[in-house]
Image: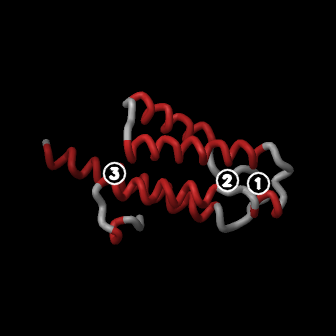
Amino acid sequence: MAEDAGSMRDEVVKGWMQSLADFDQATKEFNVDGVPLAIEGVVALADYVDSLVPTGDLQRFSGSLRALAKANRAYAITKQTENDFKNWGAAAHINDLRELSVRLLGMSGGETSA
């Protein structure tokens, strides 16, 4: 049973790190289809983390999620031109989330790529 829990954790962590990689990729290529990151999902995750009454890195993680959602909301109300995309500002929050995830999950640098 513990082995199943360990492999489930590994799959969840792998999925999260892949999501961060996908988020990062979305910040590199302008797409005329609109906001490239789901605001509601980011806010829902922050709400879940906040329900744990976080401190330290976990509190910073929640703050980074909320900052990313705020950047996404700000971008969503623009005309979403290429210039708006360049000023979006999501990449820094995604990098913070990646670094915090590595620390919180006790990962080594080589484990950060999905």
- Do the residues bearing badges 1 and 2 touch, measured as CB atoms within 8 Å? yes
Quadrant of the image for the C terminus? Answer: bottom left
Of the residues shown, which amino acid type is indicated by label 3? Leu
Query: Helix or strand or loop: what does disc 1 sit on?
Result: loop
Question: What residue sits 60% from the left and 48% below the top?
Answer: 68
The residue singled out by tag 3 in the image is 104
Q: Which of marks 2 and 3 is nearer the N terminus?
A: 2
Name the disc covering residue 36, or none: 2
Near mark 2 (Cα within 10 A), the count class, few <14, some 14-19 or many ≥20, is: some
At 55% from the left and 39% from the top, the residue drawn is 41
Q: Return the residue at label 1.
A: 33
Q: Find the distance from the CA under tag 2 to the CA under tag 3.
A: 26 Å
Q: Which residue is drawn at 30% across and 66% down?
A: 108
At a point 39% along the width and 35% down the height, the residue shown is 54
- Crowding at label 1, few (<14), some or many (≥20) Cα neighbours within 10 Å? few
Left or right of 89 on screen, residue 56: left
Residue 12, position in %: x, y? 35, 49
- Name the mark nearer the viewer: 3 or 1: 3
The percent position of residue 109, horizontal first and vertical second, equals 35, 69
59 to 27, vertically: above or below: above
